[in-house]
Image (cartoon, grey):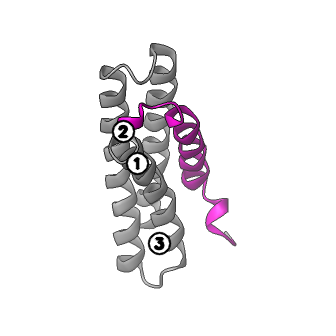
Amino acid sequence: MKSFKDIIAWQKAYELTLLIYRYTKNFPESEEFGLKSQLRRASVSVISNIAEGFKRNGKKDKLKFYNQSQASLEEVKCQIMLAFDLKYFNKDIFIELDQMSEESSRVLFGWVKSQR
């Protein structure tokens, strides 16, 4: 692989991040610095840590960033559920984001496992 962009786990998480930005656009103004911001930052953290880990030297250093990416993805999954329960997402959007986050998680798990 020549670039972090070649990592399928990054590609899946990037798609998820774009959807999160699209679907959080209409969150209540009161969430501008709350859940909206946190959800966006957590999703960006997933892709950023994969990218940074890719460029790191040494297995231990790479895995540290990939593991952080996994943790941020769990954060995203929790926040998606919270946004749905607060009625910020309708059921169709929730299902789409939930399925995409689960798929991203499976692919990322496989990537991390392959790097060990």
> Would you place residue 70 above or below residue 32 in this image?
below
Mark 3 residue type: Gly
Q: Which mark is residue 45?
A: none
Q: Which mark is residue 31?
A: 2
- Most foreground residue, 114 or 78: 78
Question: Where residue 25 sits in the image (x, y, percent)?
Answer: 54, 36
Q: Residues within 10 Å of mark 1 (few under 14, many from 20)?
A: few
Question: Where residue 115 sits in the image (x, y, percent)?
Answer: 45, 66
Question: Where residue 78 sits in the image (x, y, percent)?
Answer: 30, 37
Is residue 8 rendered magenta in the image?
yes
Identify the element where label 2 is drawn: helix
- Mark 1 and 2 residues: CB-CB less than 8 Å, in contact? yes
Query: Image quarter for residue 29?
Result: top left
Q: For the point 45% across and 32% down, which residue is it?
A: 27
Range shown magenta: 2-31
Instruction: Name the residue beneath numbered marker 1.
Output: 37
Q: What is the distance, in whole Å, between disc 3 and disc 2 at their CAs?
A: 31 Å
Mark 1 residue type: Ser
Dot 1 or dot 3, earlier in sequence: 1
- What type of secondary structure mainly makes up the magenta span? helix
